[in-house]
Amino acid sequence: MIIFKRKQFTNKYYNIELKINSNQINITGFLDTGNIASYCNKPIIFLDKKFYDKNFNVYTIVNIKTIKGIEYINCYKPEYFYINDNKISKDVLIAFTKFDNDINCLLNVLLFN
């Protein structure tokens, strides 16, 4: 029998600072433990579309499995992505989507592996 130890997260909200095409964004991110989307070992972080700028350069197009099925999403490579005020730097991709609630950023559980 194999028993896996599941990582427990006590904090679900994190301060996020990122920069895309010289646009700095400071938001609070919510850790979505169901978000395991990645591309080339880079976790995909979802930001609300209100942060999107048409001048952002697409880094790659990724197909991901969602609740709605397989979707193709544009991903963007930030100049930097920091978690919390201690500036923990992570190599990630950013995708934009429309949220129907107060969430502005869905973090990926792979950030904490």
Image (cartoon, rainbow, N blue to C red):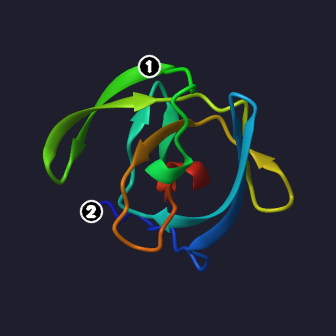
**Which amino acid is tagged 2?**
Met
Residue at mark 1: 60
The residue drawn where x is 14% and y is 50% is 68
In this rendering, the answer to whether 110 lies above or below 92 is below
Q: Is residue 76 left or right of residue 82?
A: left
Residue 51: image location, x then y, percent: 56, 48
- As helix, strand or loop, the secondary structure at mark 1 comes to strand
Residue 99 found in image quarter: bottom left
Q: Is residue 65 left or right of residue 33?
A: left
In this rendering, the answer to whether 26 lies above or below 66 is below
Any mark on residue 18, and which? Answer: none
The quarter of the picture where the N terminus appears is bottom left
Q: Is residue 90 left or right of residue 100?
A: right
Residue at the bottom extreme of this rendering? 10
**Which amino acid is tagged 1?**
Thr
Residue at mark 2: 1
Residue 94: image location, x then y, percent: 52, 38
Q: How many marks?
A: 2
